Amino acid sequence: MTVLLMTPPMTQLNTPYPATAYLTGFLRSRGYEAVQRDPAIELFLEMMTAPALDIIRQHVEDNFESFEDDELPDVIYTFMAEFDRYRLAVEPVIRFLQGKDPSLALRIVSRRFLPEGPAFDAIAQMEAVSGDILKTAFGSLGLQDKAKYLATLFINDLSAVITQGVDPYFEVSRYGERLAAANPSFDSLYETVMGEPSFSSEILEQLVEMYLEETQPSVVALTVPFPGNMLGALRIAQTCKAINPDIPIVMGGGFVNTELRALKDPRVFEFIDFICLDDGERPFMTLLEYFDGKRDIDDLVRTYFLAENDNGEQYVHYNENAELHDIPQTDVGTPIYDGLPLTEYLSLCEMLNPMHRIWSDGRWNKLTIAHGCYWRKCSFCDVTLDYIDRYDAAGADILVDRIEELIEETGQTGFHFVDEAAPPKALFALARRLIERGVVISWWGNIRFEKTFTPERCQLLADSGCVAVSGGLEVASDRLLKLMKKGVSVEQVARVTKAFSEADILVHAYLMYGFPTQTEQETIDALEMVRQMMAQGCFQSAFWHRFAATAHSPIGINPEEFGITLAERPDILFAENDVDFTDPTGTNHEMLGEGLRKALYNYMHGIGYDQSMDFWFELPVKRTLVKKDLISNAIHNLIVSS
């Protein structure tokens, strides 16, 4: 039995999404023949060729046939006006971003080789504030990085051409997302998949046909990590069924685990035969045993499939089977990347900020230190779901063994630990083992800003190869942090992040606004806290997220405890996640959100720290009540105590 595993488009362009590598490693350790492909990167690369641009141009001309030049979107106008330069540059730029042609950097930084569309406006906007922003960011010798940044803007423009002029569902990392995210009805997705194929879906179909011919699979398995992967998953399944109607199609992944827990629409099973929830190893292995005739269908674990009632009517059945336990982390095996085109991924520089770019720059091997979250108390988080609630660690020696195996296979020493929140004790143990065994890697991951991260322990992590961490400051308000049971305070976060920065570890802070009962005053004060922390060098990068109540979080389950009222929910037949709510506080979060993002964007580029709070907002806002030396005093307490 041969299993073909795929990640549908789109996820990220610089490194493979790890789910298929995890499952490939696990299945091979259990004696199954598992192969994997990444249609996401291959689809993108097929679209970024000179012949593909010829086709894209024809689509654009057809779709904008009746438009005058001054009516065209800016990115479309530039594409048509500079088409010959786009066509000439696209393939060399892709090779450069793959690390295959570094000498092209000299031409790219000349600013005369690449056509410059609307994506390049960001440079002019920043230069209007702070002068030669590229020289500030890269100096005179940062040639490769500067070229990578300009090349990324070029790719962003071409991606926008495809989205605005050819295929409205195409986005580099969120392909067709709005069709699936928290959509209670399957109608829009179903109609899109059953309708005329788009430009990108035609290429995807050709890739899938090639994969099936190459691998001759007995089973096809698709991982759907995000809402934006669902459209691609259905198109892949549709193509597989057209070629071989009898081939079983299995689906799982993060989107499924979070949003399809109330699935009822049988039309989904016109494309997919089985849908597995939560960790995939046990459910998938049980399915394979069922296909082999070794188990009954009632043995399936956390699996949806189509069944018939006594009247012959089809309905969506869910089989739990709690008697079969999940595979412990010690036994899941080492991820295997065989079958993925590791030399074809693109290293992008999407922002000048050195920490922010890590997500899109470089090829990172992905590993998990521990399954689930050791804290699992935050009221905004899906703590009732398996991927958070079931905590299970593997141990330092096993992790270092897996790290060495991955280095041997991939030739890469960069590691991204993809835990919900890496447990401090396990991190410290891992760091010591890496140092003791002389294993040289560069690594980063997500943590909680706990006080256990002292300056000495931050230095230990740095010595083991830690280059960056990310964690949640969230609302930057002690009252709200307590309400959300985050387990940290603003001053504690300041001290911990400063300790990481002092150890030359880059820090990214996740920020949140619009939390239940959050006032305008608290929001402005939060921005002032962030301004002070970034000015003091506590963290270098951050992102504001608009709070959303989710169905599986304590807030979604017990909204009255947080002072809000949930909106009446529609009948859920497909996806469920975000839940609308009414907050009696009445804060204008839409207006505030724009100002928060504008201020943060400037802070991340090292500018705007001296501007008053009201400079960033369209409407007058309250004056901050935060003392100007609050964060510096908190950091001073760290220095004195250490």
Image (cartoon, rainbow, N blue to C red):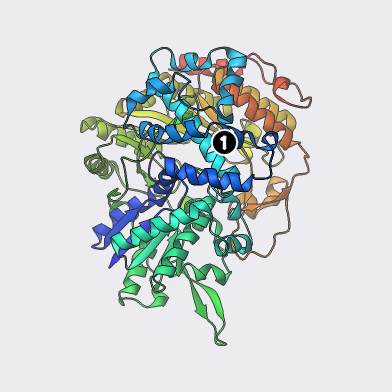
* Nearer to us in this view, 99 or 543: 99
As drawn, 310 above or below 446: below
Q: Name which residue type carries label 1.
A: Met
Quarter of the view holding residue 311 = bottom right
Residue 102 drawn at (x, y percent): 33, 26
Image quarter in which the N terminus is found: bottom left
- Can you see residue 375? no
In the image: residue 67, left or right of residue 16: right
- Can you see residue 509? yes
Circle 1: is it few (<14), some (14-19), or many (20+) Cα within 10 Å? some
As drawn, 235 above or below 65: below
As drawn, 4 above or below 626: below
The residue at the point 70 percent across, 30 percent down is 522
Quarter of the view holding residue 623 = top right
* Nearer to us in this view, 30 or 490: 30
Q: Which residue is mark 1?
A: 80
Residue 506 drawn at (x, y percent): 44, 25
In the image: residue 326, left or right of residue 475: left
Residue lying farthest to the bottom in this orientation: 311
Image quarter in which the C terminus is found: top left
Disc 1 is placed on an element classified as: helix
The residue at the point 30 percent across, 65 percent down is 216
Residue 518 drawn at (x, y percent): 70, 36
* Nearer to us in this view, 253 or 176: 176
The residue at the point 44 percent across, 58 percent down is 205
Residue 8 drawn at (x, y percent): 44, 53
